Image: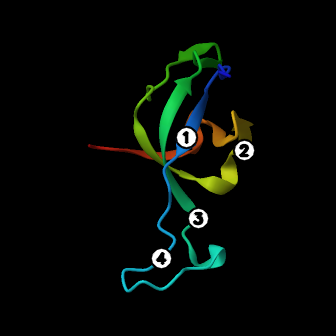
Amino acid sequence: MKIKPLFDRVVVLPINEQKASHGGLVLPETAMSEQTIGKIVAVGSGTTFDGNSCEMFVKPNDTIVFNKYTCDEVKLDNTTHYVLRQIDIIGVLDD
């Protein structure tokens, strides 16, 4: 199943977060960072703001950092994806 985001939204596949510390201790969910790293799988066409076109600055396969509390969780083919607005992306990681 595929999803096409509308306007300035993106669909992100989260990259597995580290569940243990460097010393091997298992970290509880509350101790983990609010920021999440993920790979963009789909991008909307953009939107308009005050009559001006706002382009999308990210593209599929970009690795991004985003706040996991500003997005919606969607299950596609038993895999969790996040849908968020471009403005909620903290930054794009260089490979």
Q: Earlier in the sequence, mark 3 or mark 1?
A: 1
Relative to 60, does residue 71 appear above or below in the rendering? Answer: below
- Identify the residue at the far front of this view: 78
User: Residue 11's spot in the image, x, y percent?
Assistant: 60, 32
On the image, numbered disc 4 is attached to which residue? 20
> Mark 4: which amino acid?
Ala
Q: How crowded is mark 2: few (under 14 residues within 10 Å), some or many (20 or more)?
A: some
> Mark 3: which amino acid?
Glu
Of the pair 20 and 12, the residue shown nearer to us: 20
Q: Which of marks 3 and 2 is nearer the N terminus?
A: 3
The C terminus is located in which quarter?
top left
Q: Is residue 7 left or right of residue 12?
A: right
Q: Are marks 4 and 2 in contact (CB under 8 Å)?
A: no
On the image, numbered disc 1 is attached to which residue? 13
Residue drawn at x 44%, y 25% as measured from the top left: 59
Give the label, 4 or 2, closer to the camera: 4
Alpha carbon distance from label 3 to label 1: 16 Å
Give the label, 3 or 4, closer to the camera: 4
Relative to 33, does residue 6 appear above or below in the rendering? Answer: above
Residue 30 placement: quadrant: bottom right
Q: Which of marks 3 and 4 is nearer the N terminus?
A: 4
Relative to 14, does residue 43 appear above or below in the rendering? Answer: above
> Mark 2: which amino acid?
Glu
Q: Which of marks 4 and 2 is nearer the N terminus?
A: 4
User: Residue 73's spot in the image, x, y percent?
Assistant: 72, 44
User: Residue 43's spot in the image, x, y percent?
Assistant: 55, 23
On the image, numbered disc 2 is attached to which residue? 73
